[in-house]
Amino acid sequence: MAARPLPRIASAAVLLHAGPPDGPEGPLAVLVLAERPDVRERLALMLRGAGHRTDALASPAAALDRLHLAPYDALVAAFRPPAAPVLALARALRAMPPPMGRIALLGLAPTTSERQRRDIAAAGFDHALAELVPPAEDLLEALRRAVRARWGPGPLNADLRDALAARLAPEALEASDDAAMRAAGERALALRAGGSAWTAAAVREAAEEIAAALAPVGALAAPAAARALAMAPERRNALLPPLLSSLVALRGALRRDREARSGARGPISGAGRDTPHDPKDDSP
């Protein structure tokens, strides 16, 4: 009897991925899927030229393997419909829990068929263009739209962070950030540990407290995730993991923001994936 293939297991880096560190407008990690080598090369060249970390593969099976090994914010798939294996990959990703199931999907699929367009959307693609290799401007805008739709806003409100930095000394800003993260983290971890003991009303109250604790420090994505949980406390098991991931991302974003403002690093828009990993960023 032939041995069954071992199930794919996501790496720790993938499981801890909380989305693009600087939001949809910042550098992204993108995986390109295209059977034709020339299409792969042209798409990768445009994406790298825009500052995105980009890898490119030829088959859906290889893409699925890579997505289990390394974290990506978006998959850009160029294909000619019906392309059943590509649509099957999209459906498989959407069936997975976050963060893998949350990856942004952009389809580049030349078709005039309304049915094929519906099939692409039904498979889980966030956005699609009707060209295998669109102009760079169209590609980058569609990518931003797909990432924004899937991952939401960036972690921080830049205008509010500017106002806080103008009003507070660096030590006070750090203390304010730490207090907000501590308050939110304690409530989030209690939600994770409480099991079935939490009533819907208690979950709603805790989520609202998390959002209220984080908003004053300029957080965007984490309060949004908390508010989503407050609006649907009965979906706690589904909505709590994205909230915890957003808190992990927020801790790192706050630290990078303070370091950029103190002159320890370049502009915040350039900080992100090449920053040495800080183990403290792996917990809310």
Image (cartoon, grey):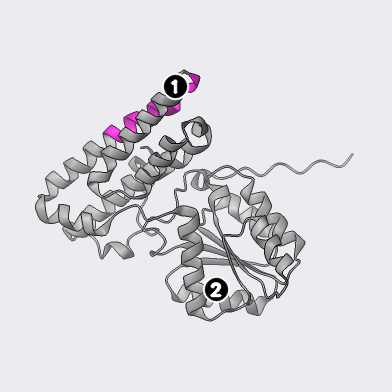
Residue 240 position in % (x across, y down): 46, 36
Q: Relative to residue 222, is residue 173 drawn left or right?
A: left
Image: 246 above or below 163 = above
Which amino acid type is marked by label 1?
Trp
Residue 136 position in % (x across, y down): 50, 79
Which residue corresponds to mark 1? 198
Image: 209 above or below 269 = above
Label 2 SS = helix
Q: Main secondary structure of the magenta part?
A: helix
Q: Relative to residue 169, is residue 274 drawn left or right?
A: right
178 and 187: which one is in front?
187
Mark 1, residues whose alpha carbon is within 10 Å: few (<14), some, or many (≥20)? Answer: some
Q: Quadrant of residue 86?
A: bottom right
Which residue corresponds to mark 2? 44
Please state the extent of the stretch shown in magenta in the rendering.
Answer: 183-196
Q: Quadrant of the N terminus?
A: top right
Residue 6 position in % (x across, y down): 72, 42
Residue at point 26%, 50% (across, down): 218
Mark 2 to mark 1 CA distance (whole Å): 47 Å
Q: Quadrant of residue 9?
A: top right
Which amino acid type is marked by label 2?
Ala
Q: Quadrant of the C terminus?
A: top left
Residue at point 46%, 42% (across, down): 242
Query: Residue extending furthest right?
Result: 1
